[in-house]
């Protein structure tokens, strides 16, 4: 009996899912595993946000919400975009979905024809690729090397655009590399896109508030107002407010696109949870101290990890400008021999070795289309990260490197 349709064939089991399963299995065997594979803040949702959900439920906001989002939440998004990003959107230019993930899915489902090309900057969030493949689109991965801060250059973008290009996907700052573009870089990419009026632009800004060293965030649409009519800005409350479980994300873009995405959403789920939307609205409208405190904690953790990796011969990590990951270069370890005599041929094998020997779950760069790297999440306490770095250093020191 065949259950899965051929539409799912191009979606390979993801390396990050493999790591998470392997880490869970090791934990179940009683092994001491530090799971740095996960991409979610380890903080609790601030109490005033939880209370807002409670009050909404008690008020009776428990019925089907409008498909595109409650008026309160869409207004909160409109106000947020104005206040924080100097962007003007109307209520019908906003959709609220079950996480930014669903915004991404809705957008691709609403717009892609088979064979349409979607440009993405490798290393990229793995789901970008899978959504496009499920929907019959073609992924065009543009390699953004560490030497260029994992950023796309205008020349690369220009060279990649073809008559089939439907979307360019940007992620500011990026998962997994924490790449951050300068304001001038964003405008230079915008100038290229000016010359290609058929290309839609998706700017995933979910890590907007996790930006280090005093950097100020600039939304792609703010940097390039002339392109606003073909930009979909994607954001959500998961990362900034430690609300991954509430599943609320949003998109802002031209009304016809938002209308098409709403059509998709109405068939999938009839909208996002009403009570979670009330919580998300209170997150956007309420005090922002916790957002700043989370960001500071992530910066301290990044500093610790960068300093410790710098002391490990064979690994490299330039300080990420944002997000809560370290994409660690491990090129010098390819071909090294593990204590059991096995040769580590690629970053997947290095990640498997680190899990077995150091008890640290990390995700290989191949999951993000850029090798040889592995990603650790810094969404763990300084104490846990310090322990993880001790173990990592000890395990790497056991490898016999090629001379
Ligand atoms: N976009 C990026 C770049 C992410 O890393 C993630 C989550 O890891 C998402 C979107 C999805 O976030 P949400 O929890 O809002 O679905």
Image: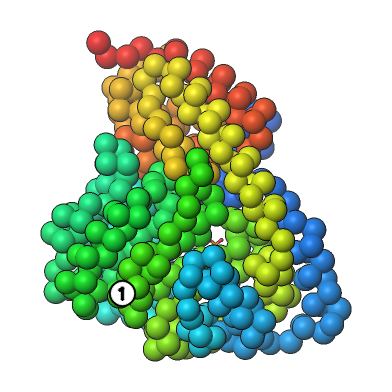
Q: Is residue 218 visible in the rendered structure shown here?
A: yes
The residue labelled by disc 1 is 227
Of the 4 image quadrants, the one containing the N terminus is bottom left
Crowd around label 1: few <14 · some 14–19 · many ≥20 (10 Å): some
Percent across and percent down for residue 136 are 29, 72
**Residue situated in front as seen by the camera: 2 or 164:** 164
Percent across and percent down for residue 137 are 28, 70
Percent across and percent down for residue 50 are 78, 64
**Residue situated in front as seen by the camera: 4 or 188:** 188
Residue at left offset 58%, top offset 34%? 301
**Would you say 301 lies left or right of 167 here?**
right
> Which quadrant of the structure image shows residue 314?
top left
Check the image and report above or below for 48 versus 149.
below
Percent across and percent down for residue 234 are 46, 68
> Which quadrant of the structure image shows residue 186?
bottom left
Of the 4 image quadrants, the one containing the C terminus is top left
User: Mark 1: is the Cβ under 8 angstroms from ligand 1?
Assistant: no
Residue at left offset 33%, top offset 68%? 224
Q: Is residue 103 visible in the rendered structure shown here?
A: no
Check the image and report above or below for 216 versus 255.
above
Residue at left offset 16%, top offset 55%? 155
Q: Residue furthest right?
A: 58
SS at mark 1 in the image: helix
Figure disc tally: 1
**Would you say 254 lies left or right of 291 here?**
left
Check the image and report above or below for 13 versus 97.
above
Residue at left offset 33%, top offset 22%? 333
Check the image and report above or below for 249 versus 368.
below
> Which quadrant of the structure image shows residue 342?
top left
């Amino acid at each position: 009996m065949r259950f899965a349709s051929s539409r799912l064939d191009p979606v390979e089991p993801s390396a990050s899912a493999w790591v998470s399963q392997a880490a869970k299995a090791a934990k179940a065997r009683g092994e001491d595993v530090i799971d740095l594979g996960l991409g979610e803040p380890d903080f609790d949702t601030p109490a005033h946000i939880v209370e807002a959900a409670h009050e909404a439920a008690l008020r009776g906001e428990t019925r089907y919400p409008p498909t595109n989002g409650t008026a309160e939440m869409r207004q909160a998004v409109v106000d947020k975009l104005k206040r924080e990003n100097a962007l003007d959107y109307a209520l019908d230019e906003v959709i609220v979905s079950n996480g930014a993930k669903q915004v991404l899915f809705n957008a691709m489902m609403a717009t892609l024809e088979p064979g349409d090309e979607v440009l993405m900057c490798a290393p990229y969030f793995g789901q970008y690729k899978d959504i496009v493949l499920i929907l019959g689109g073609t992924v065009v991965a543009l390699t953004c090397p560490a030497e260029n801060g994992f950023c796309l250059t205008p020349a690369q973008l220009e060279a990649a655009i073809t008559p089939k290009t439907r979307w360019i996907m940007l992620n500011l700052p990026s998962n997994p590399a924490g790449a951050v573009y300068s304001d001038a870089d964003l405008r230079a990419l915008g100038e290229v896109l000016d010359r290609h009026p058929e290309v839609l632009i998706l700017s995933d800004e979910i890590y907007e508030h996790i930006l280090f060293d005093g950097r100020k965030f600039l939304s792609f649409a703010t940097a390039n107002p002339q392109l606003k009519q073909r930009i979909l800005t994607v954001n959500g409350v998961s990362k900034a407010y430690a609300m991954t479980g509430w599943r609320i994300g949003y998109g802002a873009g031209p009304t016809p696109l938002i209308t098409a995405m709403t059509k998709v959403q109405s068939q999938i789920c009839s909208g996002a949870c009403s009570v979670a939307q009330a919580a998300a609205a209170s997150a956007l409208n309420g005090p922002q101290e916790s957002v700043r405190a989370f960001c500071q904690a992530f910066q301290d953790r990044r500093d610790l990890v960068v300093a410790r990796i710098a002391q490990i011969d064979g690994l490299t990590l330039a300080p990420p400008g944002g997000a809560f990951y370290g994409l660690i270069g491990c090129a010098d370890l390819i071909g090294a021999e593990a204590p059991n005599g096995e040769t580590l041929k690629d970053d997947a094998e290095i990640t498997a070795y680190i899990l077995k020997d150091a008890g640290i779950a990390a995700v290989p760069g191949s999951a993000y289309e850029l090798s040889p790297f592995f990603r650790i999440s810094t969404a763990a306490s300084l104490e846990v990260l310090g322990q993880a770095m001790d173990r990592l250093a000890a395990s790497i020191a056991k490898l016999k490197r090629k001379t």
